[in-house]
Image (cartoon, rainbow, N blue to C red):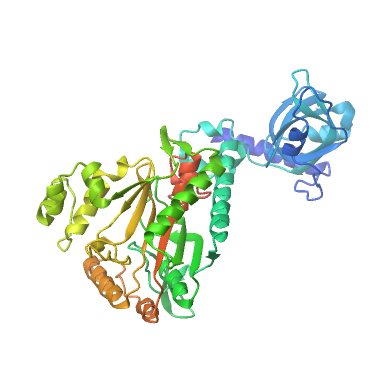
Amino acid sequence: MDELNQVLKQRRQKAQELADLGVNLYANDFRPAHRISDILAKNDNPDAPLEEGVKSVAGRIMALRKFGKAAFLHLQDETGRIQVYVKRDEVGPEVYQIFKKLDLGDIAGFGGALFRTQTGELTIDAASVKPITKSLRPLPEKFHGLTDVETRYRQRYVDLIMNPEVRDTFRKRVEIIRLIRDFLTNRGFMEVETPMMQAIAGGATAKPFKTHHNALGMDLYLRIAPELYLKRLLVGGFEKVFEINRNFRNEGLSTRHNPEFTMLEFYQAFATYEDLMDLTEEMVSYIAAEVTGSMVVSYQGQEVDLSPPWKRYTMDEALIEVGKVDKAVLADPDRTRQLALEKGIALEPLSGHGKAKTELFELLVEEKLVNPTFVTQYPTEVSPLARRNEKNPEVTDRFELFMTGREMANAFSELNDPIDQKQRLQKQIAERGSDEEIFPEMDEDFVRALEYGMPPAAGEGIGIDRLVMLLTDSPSIRDVILFPHLRPESK
């Protein structure tokens, strides 16, 4: 800490010396004429003549070697890095005196012609130097090698400066979201925005964040899902809608969970969950090919083949074939419940056969599903918003999509019977109990909307963060969220 304080003191001293020389430490009058990547691309052939003309670039000084009357430095902008050669006899003694007071991390502009060094490195022969922003805090020497990864998340701005692969991850994230938008828009879906603050936390079972609106004198909740509002739009006559936005859940932190995360939800009238399986398969495999150039991606040492068609199981089939649960046990509610208890699963007194099977699936099957797999026919007991299967009312027309042992998407044919919907919501509320910190409420307005008539439809939610993790080979959700939530920094 004493060493850092000494460096900070030296930086401030240099800043004062520059100010005394009349240098504007935070100038805004330099306009680079070129981006570094453009210069590199146009001169990538070492055997071809260099592009003529003066090149003007700006960026952050990432490496600096001074040799008395000359210096080499590496300059980095958003697009890349290039070497710059600064010579006192070329820029003049006054400018060179200013240049010598620049540090690693300073932002500066340079202008000059191109040449190649003896090693063949493309270099700008500086004819002008312009200090733009003085850095008062030093860059870490080996930031990427820090053992405390939380420092990278907490100081993401430094992480982005030092690590081009991190910048690439977030460029890919933007590209993935753009491709999703284009894919759905080209198929007639309309992008919408629904409330982030809701009077009733509905659309999923999760603990919400609570706030208070002073003017209205009422409590509000940050949404845990946009589902019920998007379905209201189906009632209103929009037949294909989607939203990409944040959800908030006041729950634990892990490599897969952040309290603030990004979801895609989309709904299509006159469609079934089977239609959405086909659409999801097409969309995700298309995005993977566009982003990675391949249908086979590597995730944390595992190969994941996204080539259609994807495997499809019913939940019972998955429990039998993957989880190795005896078919006779699965058919008997008492034996299924007993097996769950033997496996250490804590079941609520009112939990039934469907809940026990779902818990067993999560324990015995989920982590084994590496390649994309659709699991269908979820029990009605654990699917309060999904349409019952007409042949077997104990299950619903629902699927979840799994890859790399984790859920990537959840979808179902929507329940549009207002009487059935109200009864299932009442049952869900009763099972959740009155001991919860925020007692669940019935969304009477949503039921009223269904009473006006919602067309048959299917809807789906896809976790954007988890999809980005897969396509960028990122082990933690914090690696794909620019500013993840962390515990307060220790003083």
Q: Please tell me in which quadrant of the rendered image residue 311 appears.
A: top left
Residue 227, x across and y down, in percent: 41, 66
Q: Residue at x 42, y 78 (%)?
A: 218
Q: Residue at x 74, y 34 (%)?
A: 41
Can see residue 491? no
Residue with the most extreme top position: 118
Residue 191, x across and y down, in percent: 54, 65
Residue 332, x across and y down, in percent: 11, 54
Horizontally, is 296 left or right of 126 in the view?
left
Q: How many labels were placed on the picture?
A: 0
Task: Work out whether residue 13 or residue 480 is closer to the camera in this orientation and state it.
Answer: 480
Q: Eyeballing the image, is 265 above or below 216?
A: above
Q: Eyeballing the image, is 10 above or below 358?
A: above
Q: Residue at x 41, y 60 (%)?
A: 460
Horizontally, is 77 left or right of 342 in the view?
right
Horizontally, is 159 left or right of 423 in the view?
right
Horizontally, is 26 left or right of 332 in the view?
right
Task: Work out whether residue 176 or residue 480 is closer to the camera in this orientation and state it.
Answer: 176
Q: Residue at x 74, y 33 (%)?
A: 40
Task: Work out whether residue 134 or residue 394 is closer to the camera in this orientation and state it.
Answer: 394
Residue 224, x across and y down, in percent: 40, 63
Task: Work out whether residue 113 or residue 213 is closer to the camera in this orientation and state it.
Answer: 113
Q: Please tell me in which quadrant of the rendered image residue 395 appears.
A: bottom left
Can see residue 234? yes
Q: Eyeballing the image, is 257 above or below 430?
A: above
